[in-house]
């Protein structure tokens, strides 16, 4: 049996970090919780999403078998259209046979009144899960979702790419800088709180360039009021760690754009 119940907001928002980079994914279901590892079609962004059963209140996560299914994320999220955030919702996943082939379908009930069915995809038809690289990134910056969104909203009016820098010099506080734009229009933000740099040399400057398209989509998928931990290094992927709902976690990596000298 696979039955997951919660509010519309919980069952909808648990998949928004995936929607930010991919239209479909392999959804791993186990008695311990849900998990997704997905890469976008252009191989620029990776999302690693972990939703332990504690995300759902006691008695609301009933899973007695492990299963991997293919999920059309866009279709899944559209099931919640016109539903109120606090309405009660229930997901059941059932197996059935069609022309001798075993398939699965997701059944969503809302407020014990409305019922919708979504045929799940064969996971073999979806790109294989990518191995998440283990990176050592020397700069760690803690920022709020609201701060980062404000930066991106202003930066996107100045250019398509954003440069992030972390600077550490003797006798001054570590500095985090976000810049975008060209000779016509520029944006810049500086932050000295929540910045930590681990390096052996007494002076270090770490910087990388990233696409704003990806970053704007990802920050929209993060819940209001959440704190984001960003990990940065020279011409290395940017890693963003953040909480999903009350007990879930997501890590997103964005590949850098390498600047030509």
Image (spheres, helix red, strand yellow):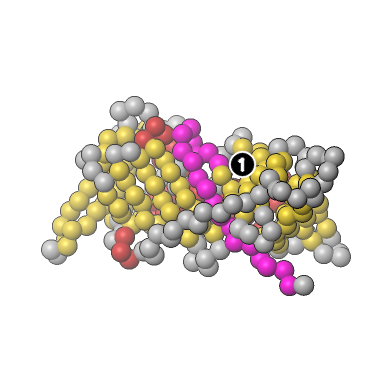
For label 1, the SS is strand
The picture places residue 41, in percent across and down from the top left corner, at 49, 66
The picture places residue 200, in percent across and down from the top left corner, at 71, 48
Q: Tell me if 215 is positioned left or right of 155 in this view.
A: left
Figure label count: 1
Q: Tell me if 56 is positioned left or right of 120 in this view.
A: right
Question: Between 38 and 153, which is closer to the camera in this rendering?
Answer: 38
Q: Tell me if 99 is positioned left or right of 3 in this view.
A: left
Residue 143 falls in image quadrant: top right
Say which quadrant the N terminus sits in.
Answer: top left
The picture places residue 106, in percent across and down from the top left corner, at 29, 49
Say which quadrant the C terminus sits in.
Answer: bottom right
Question: Between 182 and 240, which is closer to the camera in this rendering?
Answer: 240
Q: Tell me if 205 is positioned left or right of 245 in this view.
A: right
Quick check: is 204 in the magenta stretch?
no
Q: Residue furthest bottom?
A: 260
Is residue 193 visible in the rendered structure shown here? yes
Is residue 214 visible in the rendered structure shown here? no
Q: Which residue lies at the image location 17% right of the left edge and 62% below the top edge? A: 101
Q: Which residue lies at the image location 64% right of the left edge and 62% below the top edge? A: 256
Residue 234 falls in image quadrant: bottom right
Q: Which residue lies at the image location 60% right of the left edge and 58% below the top edge? A: 237
Task: Classify 10 Å Cα crowding around label 1: few (below 14), some (14-19), many (20 and above).
Answer: many
The picture places residue 165, in percent across and down from the top left corner, at 75, 53
Residue topped by disc 1: 228
Q: Residue furthest left?
A: 100
Q: Which residue lies at the image location 63% right of the left edge and 59% below the top edge? A: 236
- The span shown in magenta is 242-260
Residue 157 falls in image quadrant: bottom right
Quick check: is 245 in the magenta stretch?
yes
């Amino acid at each position: 049996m696979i039955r997951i119940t919660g509010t519309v907001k919980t069952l909808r928002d648990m998949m928004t970090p995936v929607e930010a980079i991919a239209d479909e994914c392999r959804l791993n279901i186990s008695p311990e919780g849900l998990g997704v590892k997905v890469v976008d079609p252009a191989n620029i962004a990776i999302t690693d999403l972990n939703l332990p059963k504690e995300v759902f209140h006691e008695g609301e996560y009933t899973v007695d078998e492990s299963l991997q299914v293919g999920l059309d994320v866009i279709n899944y999220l559209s099931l919640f259209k016109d539903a109120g955030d606090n309405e009660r919702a229930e997901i059941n996943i059932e197996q059935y046979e069609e022309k001798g082939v075993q398939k699965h379908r997701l059944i969503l009930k809302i407020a014990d009144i409305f019922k919708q069915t979504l045929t799940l995809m064969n996971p073999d038809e979806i790109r294989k899960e990518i191995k998440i690289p283990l990176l050592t990134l020397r700069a760690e910056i803690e920022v709020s979702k609201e701060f980062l969104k404000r930066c991106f909203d202003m930066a996107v009016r100045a250019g398509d790419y954003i440069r992030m820098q972390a600077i550490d010099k003797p006798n001054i506080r570590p500095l985090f800088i976000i810049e975008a734009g060209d000779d016509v229009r520029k944006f810049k933000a500086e932050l000295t709180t929540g910045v930590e740099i681990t390096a052996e040399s007494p002076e270090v400057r770490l910087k990388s360039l990233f696409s704003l398209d990806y970053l704007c989509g990802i920050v929209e998928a993060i819940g209001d009021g959440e704190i984001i931990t960003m990990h940065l290094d020279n011409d290395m992927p940017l890693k963003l760690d953040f909480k999903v709902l009350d007990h879930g976690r997501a890590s997103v990596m964005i590949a850098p754009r390498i600047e030509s000298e």
